[in-house]
Image (cartoon, rainbow, N blue to C red):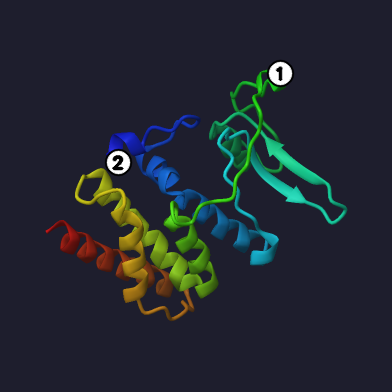
């Protein structure tokens, strides 16, 4: 897969880095980490699904069996407007979702062999903040290397894993510790990219 192929998304218009994260499913892995932190949720309370139509953006299952789903056009202006205006609602400039034109909404469980970055993110969360920080930093370096055609698409997950295996995963105690983990992971990732590219 080439960078241009990885950056072609059927539903979303995103920047190149985020498009690659979407192709590797790292974006979903990072969203999983965010949701676990934001909602103090356990792994048993979270479920990752693949939804090719990109219409349902989140769902909450209640104990009575009902499910509340948030639907919308696949356009980042909606969540950005929602976040920027919270707790108010503003016009995001996105066309309303036309229910009459919707096709079937389908879901599938993720294939972790096909999307190892998603699995890495889920496992990193269980290891702690040092691992999630290191994974995010490593992924930024490896995706940049892929976009610069220094490594192959399939190298991204392997290099991210290699960085995690080489890192000292002592939990950060302050912001400076987090920044240190980030910087160290980036340096290890750069070395791994250079090793692979040579």
In terms of secondary structure, where does tag 1 sit? helix
Nearer the observer, 175 or 16: 16
Mark 2 or mark 1: which is in front? 2
Nearer the observer, 190 or 8: 8
**86 left or right, relative to 32:** right
Could you tell me which quadrant the N terminus lies in? top left
Could you tell me which quadrant the C terminus lies in? bottom left
In the image as oriented, which residue stretches furthest toward the right?
Answer: 64
**Neighbourhood count class around disc 2 (C-alpha, 10 Å): few under 14, some 14–19, many 20 upward:** few
x and y percentages locating residue 56 in the rendered image: 65, 37
**108 left or right, relative to 44:** left
> Who comes first in sequence, dot 2 or dot 1?
2
In the image as oriented, which residue stretches furthest toward the left?
Answer: 198
Residue position for label 2: 1
**34 left or right, relative to 166:** right
In terms of secondary structure, where does tag 2 sit? loop
x and y percentages locating residue 20 in the rendered image: 38, 44
**Neighbourhood count class around disc 1 (C-alpha, 10 Å): few under 14, some 14–19, many 20 upward:** few
Res. 175 in view? no
Q: Quadrant of residue 165?
A: bottom left
Nearer the observer, 186 or 50: 50
Residue position for label 1: 100
**142 left or right, relative to 56:** left
Q: Residue at x 50, y 55 (%)?
A: 30
Which numbered tag is attached to residue 121?
none
Q: Residue at x 37, y 70 (%)?
A: 164
Q: Quadrant of residue 160?
A: bottom left
């Amino acid at each position: 897969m080439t960078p241009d192929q990885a950056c072609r998304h059927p539903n979303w218009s995103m920047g190149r880095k985020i498009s690659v994260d979407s192709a590797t499913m790292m974006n979903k892995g990072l969203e999983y980490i965010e949701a676990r932190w934001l909602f103090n949720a356990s792994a048993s309370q979270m479920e990752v699904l693949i939804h090719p139509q990109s219409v349902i953006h989140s769902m909450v299952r209640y104990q009575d069996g009902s499910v509340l789903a948030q639907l919308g056009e696949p356009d980042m202006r909606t969540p950005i407007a929602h976040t920027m205006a919270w707790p108010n609602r503003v016009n995001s400039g996105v066309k309303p979702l036309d229910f009459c034109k919707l096709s079937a909404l389908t879901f599938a469980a993720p294939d972790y062999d096909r999307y190892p970055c998603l699995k890495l993110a889920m496992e990193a969360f269980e290891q702690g903040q040092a691992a999630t920080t290191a994974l995010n930093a490593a992924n930024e370096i490896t995706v940049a290397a892929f976009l610069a055609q220094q490594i192959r698409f399939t190298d991204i997950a392997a290099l991210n894993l290699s960085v995690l295996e080489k890192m000292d995963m002592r939990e950060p105690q302050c912001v400076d510790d987090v920044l240190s983990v980030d910087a160290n992971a980036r340096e290890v990732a750069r070395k791994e990219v250079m090793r692979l590219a040579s």
